[in-house]
């Protein structure tokens, strides 16, 4: 039986009853995806100014596992670190998808886009002796994509590559879209890196039900709708005014630099590494899903 959108949202949202403590995706979602994606939508994954952490995080997806995502759910036509092809063969895969599947492929962009020096800080390869820049190809490929996703905070908001003094002129994907007047729907899935569930969940929503509901910053409300602080297990300490003064102290981590009060994400219930741990239990929330990231990590919000 097909998974209704309502059930999907419930499963993704991870009500404690549905998911228990691990808060990873459940097999139902994997099955629904496999069925829905019988046509295997082509996906082009471009990477610009990034650390590849987003790709590595995606490899940690549990349900569905990465093998199923890549082999059964999507048809990944181009991903420079995962694909076997290189050189002309790899670039041809992009050209072919652009030519043969207009309006059908999904464009995923990891990393900010360098705009300085005509985009030469981010090149994908060359054609007829001329460099192919991320800047040009993002503009070109975005125009004919069914939808686009900015994967990670660098792509969504600029992140670390766009931090001052930003010598490469790194910009978020949304800036390239608005400058080039590209109307393709663009979803932001921030996080440095994003949780695998946020990436697979967003992709799943696009494939099964279309573009998900997003907040004012283009993030799916399903994952980024509430603050860390409003749901934090240390919130009782905050309300009582009991603050940790040094690492290891009992209490709320606000004075150690926690950005939870200004950060919208569901790490408090989803947790990381298949539900093993999360930032605030170890240290502080650095606000990695917000446009203000990277802010000084261990300085309290002023
Ligand atoms: Fe950025 Fe992706 Fe931070 Fe890295 O590649 S979101 S630097 S963890 O992971 O783009
Ligand atoms: Fe808020 Fe951070 Fe304190 Fe949790 S640890 S209550 S998120 S300030
Ligand atoms: Fe990012 Fe904060 Fe979640 Fe850690 S707890 S992953 S810093 S949003």
Image (cartoon, rainbow, N blue to C red):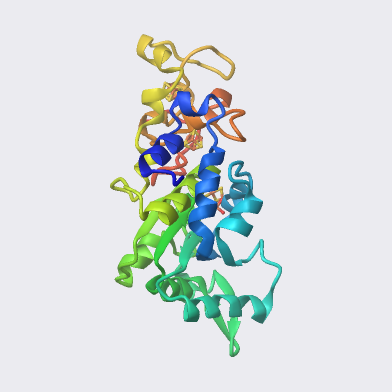
* Residue sitting at x 56%, y 40%: 27
Q: Is residue 100 above or below residue 257?
A: below
Percent of width and height locating residue 41: 50, 64
Q: Reply above or below: 32 against 155.
A: above
Horizontal side, residue 6 vs residue 130: left or right: left
Q: Horizontal and vertical percent for residue 117?
A: 48, 74
Residue at the extreme bottom of the image, as rendered: 128
Quarter of the image where one finds residue 262? top left
Task: Name the spot of residue 86 as percent of width and height, x first.
Answer: 69, 74
Left or right of residue 100, residue 217 in this image: left
Foreground residue among 254 and 42: 42
With respect to residue 251, does 134 lie above or below?
A: below
Task: Tell me, yes or no, if residue 282 can be seen here.
Answer: yes
Q: Position of residue 46 (x, y in %)?
A: 54, 65
Q: Is residue 77 above or below residue 63?
A: below
Most extreme residue toward the right is 84
Please identify the quadrant where the C terminus is shown. Answer: top left
Residue 298 visible here: no
Q: Is residue 4 left or right of residue 256?
A: left
Q: Residue at x 42, y 53 (%)?
A: 208
Residue nearest the viewer, comparing 224 with 5: 5
In this view, the residue in front, 73 or 298, is: 73
- Residue lying farthest to the front in this orientation: 1
Q: Residue at x 54, y 80 (%)?
A: 96
Q: Residue at x 71, y 68 (%)?
A: 84
């Amino acid at each position: 039986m097909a998974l209704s959108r309502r059930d999907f949202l419930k499963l993704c949202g991870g009500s404690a009853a549905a998911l228990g403590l691990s808060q990873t995706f459940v097999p139902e979602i994997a099955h629904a995806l496999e069925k829905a994606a019988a046509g295997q939508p082509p996906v082009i994954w471009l990477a610009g100014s990034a650390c590849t952490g987003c790709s590595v995080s995606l490899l940690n997806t549990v349900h569905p596992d990465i093998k199923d995502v890549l082999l059964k759910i999507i048809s990944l036509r181009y991903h420079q670190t995962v694909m076997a092809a290189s050189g002309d063969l790899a670039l041809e895969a992009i050209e072919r998808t652009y030519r043969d599947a207009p309006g059908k492929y999904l464009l995923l962009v990891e990393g900010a886009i360098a705009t300085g020096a005509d985009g030469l800080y981010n090149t994908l390869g060359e054609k007829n002796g001329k460099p192919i820049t991320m800047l040009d190809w993002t503009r070109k490929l975005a125009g004919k994509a069914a939808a686009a996703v900015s994967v990670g905070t660098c792509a969504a908001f600029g992140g670390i590559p766009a931090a001052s003094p930003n010598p490469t002129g790194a910009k978020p994907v949304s800036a390239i879209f608005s400058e080039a007047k590209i109307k393709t729907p663009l979803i932001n899935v921030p996080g440095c890196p994003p949780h695998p569930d946020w990436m697979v969940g967003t992709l799943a929503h696009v494939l099964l039900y279309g573009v998900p509901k997003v907040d004012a910053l283009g993030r799916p409300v399903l994952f980024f709708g509430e603050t860390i602080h409003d749901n934090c297990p240390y919130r009782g300490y905050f309300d009582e005014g009991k603050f940790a003064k040094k690492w290891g102290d009992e209490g709320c981590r606000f004075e150690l630099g926690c950005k939870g009060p200004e950060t919208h994400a569901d790490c408090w219930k989803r947790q990381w590494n298949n539900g093993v741990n999360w930032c605030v239990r170890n240290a502080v929330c650095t606000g990695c899903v917000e446009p203000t990231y990277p802010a000084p990590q261990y300085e309290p919000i002023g």
